[in-house]
Amino acid sequence: MTRDHLAGDIVELDRAFLEQVEATHLGRFRSVARGEVLYWQGDPVEAIFVVSSGSLKEYTLLQDGRACAYRILGAGGLAGATAYLLGHDHDTITQALDQALVLALQPSEFDDLLARNPRFASLLLQKLAQTAQSSADKARDLGFLDVQQRVMRSLMDLARQHGIATERGLEITTELTHEDIGELVAANRCTITVLLNKLQKQGLIWKQGRHWVVITPEHFQILDGLREAVVMARDWDAQELAERALAGNVDPMLALDALSGGMRQVERLYVAQELELADVIWSATVMKKAMNVIEARMVALGQQVHSLGTVVFGTVEGDIHDLGKNIVSMFLTARGFRVIDLGVDVPAERFVEAVRHHHPDILAMSALLTTTAQNARQVIQALEAAGLRSSVKVIVGGAPMTPHFATEVGADGYAPDAREAVALAWRLTQP
Ligand code: B1M
């Protein structure tokens, strides 16, 4: 069962479960104020709760005092049943995230329903199975996704389960603090603040009043599919998804970000020795094919705007990594720069020759190896020797580069990613 089916099923199941419990007229409604705790870790089980409206957060306090949230329960969510069925005290804290209404079932009522109401028993079983499934998914995410991907996935899951559709995306109707999100993805509040800003900049999420809105599930599914296609090196999927992305009006820049996210994941797996170099090559090939599909759209976007200047771009000598360069190049093209791509493994003389010939506004160099990054210095020295340094702004980027490194080799600027590279190029070309 895919994650999407699962999310759809959870919503359906929660609705059916709540209807079933309410139809029995058992239990007592109780209103819970925002922040109020229904029960603490270690409390005996006095009631089992079904959420009627609003939302609850279920979390545990770890020994070092950090909180780890398991899930957020919306209407139809069930709290306290696992501890009761296993015959021990509560091992989580359950607290209202907003004004909530819950139906409190006495243990005897719960037992009665279980024994006499087969529909209730069957729905309960499905709910427990789904809880186990989402815990397994979460454990898998912790192992394979980086924090940013986990944040995005959590928000998307919450939107699908507790969101309402708006014109541009899904609005999560629960008020979530950065701390709440951090507890869900096992990261601290500061990290979450940085990542939420990053996701907002990337156009994947935005704020509507006090609520988060995330892109539509269709777009997220395509983007997540692109990331996964790179990780799994699924050639056909990647091209098809890239085409679906364009047909479905997914922002092409988001599609490129998703492909890069896949490659970051490949690296983690490679470093953890779960992938061989051959797998990395396959993933890179898949990524390239999907990028080719997207490139045409990026070029078309760039043609719609007045040219902002010319950029001569290449990967430095000794380095054949070109995926990052190609993405930066596409972003620059889409923004309206004319990019002259010199390819990979470019010696200093070819950079100099291209500057002499094309009179670019910017010379851009990419380097991915610590060793080859030093070659950027040689290019700048060669430009100086040719008397061309003052005629062009030089920018550098790639994993081993830093702002400090850029200054040290005499470049005019450094950018950590494609978006920043576009902003930097734009700044440097302003009169
Ligand atoms: Co290579 N590789 N690789 N590799 N490879 C790295 C870079 C490495 C960090 C992996 C690792 O060991 N953890 C490591 C370098 C270690 C180091 O020096 N610090 C490494 C190594 C060692 C090697 C080989 C030596 C492996 C070998 O043969 N034993 C070999 C070197 C070959 C050579 O260049 N002479 C090699 C080969 C390869 C493949 C051919 C298999 C393949 C490249 C395929 C290709 O590019 N066509 C490959 C890949 C895919 C990687 C990793 C896994 C992913 C790189 C990538 O494409 N990322 C990589 C790990 C890593 O980088 N974390 C790794 C996706 C891409 C979109 O991101 O390139 O970072 P990135 O670009 C970003 C930003 O950096 C930035 O914006 C981009 C988009 O956001 N950016 C700029 C890039 N250029 C910019 C320029 C700018 C501004 C921003 O302004 C001008």
Image (cartoon, rainbow, N blue to C red):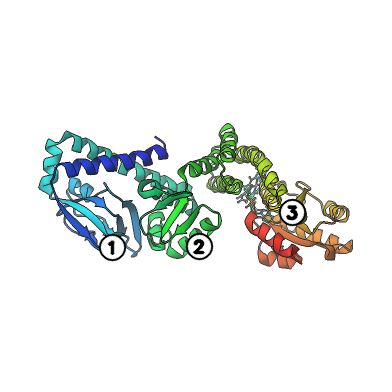
* Residue indicated by mark 2: 194
* Residue indicated by mark 3: 306
For badge 3, the amino acid type reads His
Q: Nearer the viewer, residue 30 or 345?
A: 30
> Label 2's element?
helix
How far across and down, in percent of the image, does residue 216 sit?
47, 46
> Spatial distance from mark 1 to mark 2, Cα to Cα?
26 Å
Give whichever of discs 3 and 2 has the lower sequence position.
Answer: 2
Labelled pair 3, 2 in contact (Cβ < 8 Å): no
Q: Residue at x 18, y 48 (%)?
A: 84
Left or right of 218: which side holds 122? left
* Residue indicated by mark 1: 34
Tell me the quarter of the image containing the N terminus.
top left
Q: Residue at x 21, y 47 (%)?
A: 81
For badge 1, the amino acid type reads Arg
Give whichever of discs 1 and 3 has the lower sequence position.
Answer: 1
**Above or below — where is 233 with respect to 382?**
above
How far across and down, in percent of the image, does residue 195 sit?
50, 59
Left or right of 377: which side holds 236? left
How far across and down, in percent of the image, does residue 261 sit?
56, 48
Label 3 residue near ligand 1, CB within 8 Å: no
Label 1 residue near ligand 1, CB within 8 Å: no
How far across and down, in percent of the image, does residue 253 sit?
61, 49
- Viewer-side label of 3, 2: 3
> Spatial distance from mark 1 to mark 3, Cα to Cα?
52 Å
For badge 2, the amino acid type reads Val
**Above or below — where is 200 with respect to 322?**
below
- Viewer-side label of 1, 2: 1
Q: Categorize mark 1 by other alpha carbons within 10 Å: few (<14), some (14-19), many (20+).
A: some
Q: Is residue 89 visible?
A: yes
Q: Nearer the viewer, residue 85 or 356?
A: 356
> Label 1's element?
loop
